[in-house]
Image: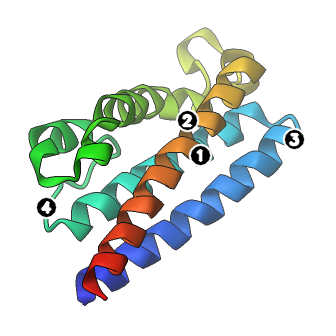
Amino acid sequence: MRLVKMTSSYLRQAHSRLRDAEEALMEGNYPYALRLSQECVELSLKASLKLTGIEYPKVHDVSDVLLDHKDRFPHWFKAEIGFMAETSSSLAAKRELAFYGGEEEFLTPEEVISRREAVEAVEKARRVYDLCYKLLSAYLEKER
């Protein structure tokens, strides 16, 4: 039951970041929307790994762990793991840019993260969150 409690907490935190990312997007704060989307994806995937008893490293991108253990997940979730791993990897790679910008080139975060990138990040974060939430819901339904 502790795993379910941890998973639920991670997903609650992920959902808060997703809502904040959507708000940042509406306000035109594209770097922040991207960064919050990355955090949503990270927390959602870590929740799913935790639910299945898979330990993960304390890093922002858990795509390798997800891919290594894809057989531990239901078929419908497994079918989306490629998308989720790519999303985790690409958003983690942009995390630092969204936070600091291109410091060597003296570019601000707003100069390196576009509206298009932010919109795409929020959309992908929503999809990853929804899949991970569905995984928890399916687990709870099975346990009843």
Q: Nearer the viewer, residue 23 or 70?
A: 70
Task: Give me the residue at 76% from left, 47% from top.
Answer: 22
Name which of mark 4 and mark 2 comes first in the sequence.
Answer: 4
What mark, if any, has residue 124 been given in the picture? 2
Secondary structure, mark 1, is helix
Check the picture and name the quadrant holding the C terminus. bottom left
Residue that sits furthest to the top in the current view: 105
Measure the alpha-carbon separation of dots 4 and 2. Answer: 24 Å
Q: Is residue 114 visible?
A: no
Say whether marks 2 and 1 touch (CB < 8 Å): yes
Say whether marks 4 and 2 touch (CB < 8 Å): no
Image quadrant where residue 44 sits? bottom left
Q: Position of residue 139 (x, y in %)?
A: 30, 72
Label 3 Cα neighbours within 10 Å, binned few <14 / some 14-19 / many ≥20: few
Say whether marks 3 and 4 touch (CB < 8 Å): no
Measure the alpha-carbon separation of dots 3 and 1. Answer: 15 Å
Up-down relation of residue 100 to residue 105 (above or below): below
Name which of mark 3 and mark 1 comes first in the sequence.
Answer: 3
Task: Give me the residue at 44% from left, 60% from top.
Answer: 134
Q: Nearer the viewer, mark 1 or mark 4?
A: 1
Q: Report which residue position mark 4 lands on.
A: 55
Q: Report which residue position mark 1 lands on.
A: 126
Q: Report which residue position mark 3 lands on.
A: 26
Task: Give me the residue at 50% from left, 34% from top.
Answer: 95
Check the picture and name the quadrant holding the N terminus. bottom left
Q: Nearer the viewer, mark 4 or mark 2?
A: 2
Name which of mark 1 and mark 4 comes first in the sequence.
Answer: 4
Q: Nearer the viewer, mark 3 or mark 2?
A: 2
Label 2 Cα neighbours within 10 Å, binned few <14 / some 14-19 / many ≥20: many
Up-down relation of residue 102 to residue 42 (above or below): above
Q: Amino acid at mark 4?
A: Glu
